[in-house]
Amino acid sequence: MTLDWNGLAHSRFLAPVCGVGAIEGTGFGFNEVYVVQPDGSLVKKLRKHGLNRWPTMRNRIMIKLTAADDGLPLIMLATLGTRRDDGQSNVHRMFKLIPDDSRRHGFFFKPHKGPWTRYTEAQCAHKIDVNDDGLDDIILCQDKKVGRIYVQHPNSTFSMIRWNGKRTKDWREARVADVTGDGLPDLIVVGNGGRINNQKPSYVRVFSGTGVSPYFDFTRKGIWFEREMPFATPNVEILDINHDGIADIYVVQADEMTEGGFCTPGKFEKRDWWGASPDPSPEFVPPPDLANDLLLVGTGDDSTKMKEVWMDHVVPGCGSLIEPFGNNYTMILSEGSMGRPGYSVLLQWFPERGA
Ligand SMILES: [Ca+2]
Ligand SMILES: [Ca+2]
Ligand SMILES: [Ca+2]
């Protein structure tokens, strides 16, 4: 994972890179920081950078925020694993990047006040501004648990917003955007069903924004749109594919982890993919993902008229990563995940001719 801190007026480093190094056999490791050299040629591994203070496990998500009090970068490291071989719990931790000219590379990471959250597995973490006050807040998806929102105060402490309801559990991914057309940001989530160990159906669901805490209506009445999905729904993105200014929703489906799917649920077996050799041969092409993605083209305020477009592209691999690319009608879809090979494609929607 790479963070670009060029905005932090420090010329001696270009881009700190964080990784997690596993300590073999112990189930956890330390976060590491690498600094790109000023000539761009090499990365240098740092010692005593601050992130090495606590061992951790499966650090899959790192988000960068801005501290409300002094404008310095905050980084939240959210973990997916909870059970560690040393018996300790994993914690989602936050650090502040402190400029320090007495250090060779001019900075270190200092533990921040919070949020530090234990005993949860983060499926997603995003920077949002849920209360529209210009200060960065956080949304967290949790495996088997209710999602969370942390609101940042002017002194850069965070408060957790609480709510209940079974519809708010098991989110795999989330986005915050106004899709109802009333100017208030709404919450778009995809659910974690469709797995072989979880017979609940997958879904995409939109909770209406309310503008007041907890900022979304989590009651049944607050569900503006909901659709069950035949396959696992690992990701969702908000785009405007037809350039009409109305938000559209792209739902990724993957037959990975779905019973009968080609990605073989359970343990990954290399021989199922490219024979007995340790690496795929150059000619190896993975089988295609047969779970079509769904595009929901928005119509403004009427969710019942949302147009469903099933995406008929078939790409080798099965995966889930999507990333908007440059504008709101282009995205990258990666079809490789969990050590499995796959293609990455760029999807772009052009305006209609004459439009
Ligand atoms: Ca805010
Ligand atoms: Ca709205
Ligand atoms: Ca649109």
Image: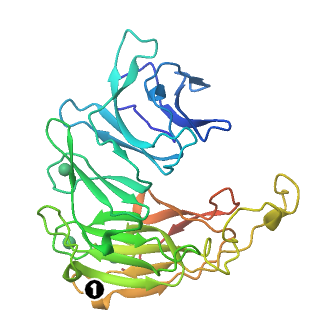
Asked whether residue 76 is in view, the answer is no
- Where is mark 1, residue-wise? 303
Residue occupying the far left of the picture: 212
Rendered view: 271 above or below 137: below
- Determine whether, in the image, residue 242 is placed left or right of residue 230: left
Q: Which of 340 and 87 is in front in this view?
A: 87
x then y, percent, for residue 261: 67, 78
Residue occupying the far top of the picture: 102
Q: Is mark 1 on a helix, strand or loop?
A: helix
Rendered view: 52 above or below 94: above
- Determine whether, in the image, residue 248 is placed left or right of residue 193: left
Name which residue lies at 43% across and 24% down.
50
Name which residue lies at 38% across and 60% down.
141
Residue occupying the far bottom of the picture: 305
| Among the 4 quarters of the image, the one containing residue 272 | bottom right
x then y, percent, for residue 20: 56, 37
